[in-house]
Image (cartoon, coloured by chain):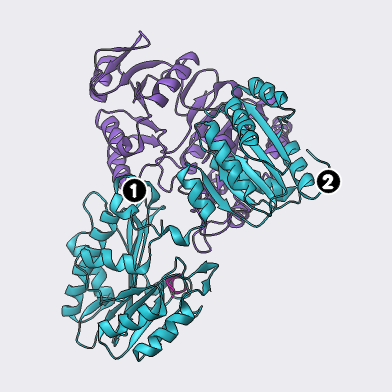
Chain colours: A cyan, B purple
Amino acid sequence: MNIHEYQARELLARAGIAVPPGVVATTPAEARRAMERLGVPKVVVKAQVHAGGRGKAGGVKLAESPEQAERVAGQILGMKIKGLTVTKVLIAPASEIASEAYVGVIVDRATRSPVFMVSPAGGIDIEEVAAKTPEKIFKQPVDARYGLLPHQAMALAFRLYADVALVRQAAELLQKLYRAFVEAGASLAEINPLVVTPKGEVVALDAKIVVDDNELERRPAIEALRDVAVEDPAEVLAREANLTYIKLDGNVGCCVNGAGLAMATMDLVKYYGGEPANFLDIGGSSNPEKVVTALKIITADPKVKAILFNIFGGITRCDDVANGIVAATRQFKVDRPIVIRLTGTNEQEALKILAGVGMHALTDMDAAVEQAVKVAKGGAAA
Amino acid sequence: MSIFIDKSTRLVVQGITGRDGSFHTKQMVAYGTPVVAGVTPGKGGQKFEGTTPIFNTVAEAVAATRANTAVIYVPAKFAADAIFEAADAGVKLIVCISEGVPVLDMTRVYPFIAERGARLIGPNCPGVITPGVAKVGIIPGQICVPGPIGVVSRSGTLTYEVVYQLTRAGLGQTTCVGIGGDPIIGTTFIDCLAAFEADPATRAVVMIGEIGGTDEQQAAEFVKAKMKKPVVGFIAGQTAPPGRRMGHAGAIISGSSGTAAEKIAAFERAGIAVMKRPADVVPLISSCLKQQVKRKR
């Protein structure tokens, strides 16, 4: 789960990291009042959106008066950055900066551990630094059973600063960052840029935290940070029904059990010359209600011209899926042709259920996908 | 022959009285797997289905039954401790089926089991099956038949699809291993490839990967440098958009890394025959086996 910058700043501040004050605004008038409240001569107005490259997209602007803050906020609110509409801006004092660094901690798949990454070349996209000047990035794996050890934090901090006073501040900050990372159940926590002010203070100017979805059940306070307003309503509906749904641009709606098979099904749609409309995994345990919700979500997409079921029954029972399809057609009008492939557990029962309402199913994945693509292109009806 | 599980497997089921644990224990027993014990704290002394003894702890189960393999069906929030417990009890092969284990839990689990010399398969995996001998996990037994092909995969139902295609074509399997769809897993492609290379009964291997991470790329280098047996590969997620988690916690393209194209290119560089779709497994594996026969002549 992504959280907003202002929320990440709050989590860091709670862990004891120095973060400049900031106020969130959802209207231009609020932005003006926010600057008045901060009482500083210059502010930065930043789009709060779950996407990188906000600066380049025009989502970060300076203002030198409350009126200008209002005007600038008016430009940023409502704009789209990488397809996401901006509904909130953060107003923060524009800091004087002596130097910019990068510090972050991620869960690293290769070492199977949290890994710190720091770089004295902060303020810009860290992937770019990694690609162009990898020698400017320093890494430290952490044994998660012990956390970031003080000497490890010091060694990293020496990579950032020469002045020992700054090194000590940064080392302390890195340990607090690790604590915030663990307490949030994060898979990534980064500060970019980490700046030194002219007074010699090390301050987190921007923060990004990505939370591991699997942590949310045991961290209700973090789950409460979810901003449903910025999510696709269909994806929210799917999540609440314990389905995984990701919208794409094509016209073949896919309903599959299992993530790997769902991806392979999308790929096969493409292989046969079609375009998948979505990724949808109904999950392992079968429940006719889930299938009904899945069909509601797929048919709500006006681009969908054909619906493809691909079910390999294991824990998922084919008869449950068939019952779900039949229940859906009774609850609402499914006005798009459906192509069904099912095989495995209780396949025969499923075929009987479908035959009862005049539907039929295929047992071969390729045949079903090929047919769905043809139907979506306006070929023979299923 | 086979890898990881065979006739000497003595299985303890952690979470044997839960909904998933009890259902799949019945299936494993029906398949002929030697299930020697179950563990549910508070139900020690009872019997599962009137036959399998239940213990309060894994240590008691191991002491009483000499169990050497554990399978975990407990809810995700208890899974890390279940793995710690099995490793502490001296179990050397631990298969964790549970889905939704927090990844930070896994960063603590992995060094712990590594220090104790235990192998973990999973989490978030369908387990292991050695057709005709034993199954540990949830892979449907009826889609597998014994034969010379090793199968290793990050997925569940996609593995079933590929195995089913092999079986229908008369191509049986030595062992099928689902290594799991999470970012941090105990047993990697390389571990399985090395085991299949060393297994005299395995003649060719099918490797089913997906987007996210670099395990497949490292596996490809291993195949090129260390393997004599032919490997056929598939990558799911060619149409997946970047930055989105495709169901599996580990199936995500981050930045420009972990794409299907990059993995397929790594396979091709390593001489791995790439399946464009699941059905391609049959012709590609068949031609590998034919070439082996020719070489022997």
Judging from the image, mark 2 belongs to the subunit labelled: A
Q: Is residue A120 visible?
A: no
Magenta segment main secondary structure = helix
Please say if A48 is above or below B246: below
Amino acid residing under circle 2: Gly
Q: Please give the name of the residue rendered at 35% of the width and 78% of the height, measured from the top-left corner.
A: A30
Q: Please give the name of the residue rendered at 72% of the width and 24% of the height, measured from the top-left corner.
A: A355
Q: Please give the name of the residue rendered at 59% of the width and 20% of the height, measured from the top-left corner.
A: B142
Q: Position of residue B204 (x, y in %)?
A: 61, 34
Is residue A12 left or right of A126 when viewed as pictured?
A: left
Within 10 Å of the Cα at label 2, are there few (<14), some (14-19), or many (20+) other Cα atoms? few
Residue tagged 2: A379
Residue A71 within the segment the image draws in magenta: no
Please say if B9 is above or below B206: above
Please say if B131 is above or below B125: above
Q: Nearer the viewer, residue A257 or A291?
A: A291
Within 10 Å of the Cα at label 1, are there few (<14), some (14-19), or many (20+) other Cα atoms? many
Q: Position of residue A217 (x, y in %)?
A: 33, 45
The stretch of residues the image draws in magenta is A125-130
Distance of label 2 from label 1 (alpha carbons): 46 Å
Judging from the image, mark 1 belongs to the subunit labelled: A
Residue tagged 1: A215
Marks 2 and 1 share the same chain: yes
Q: Secondary structure at mark 1?
A: helix
Q: Earlier in the sequence, mark 2 or mark 1?
A: 1
Q: Nearer the viewer, residue B251 or B107?
A: B251
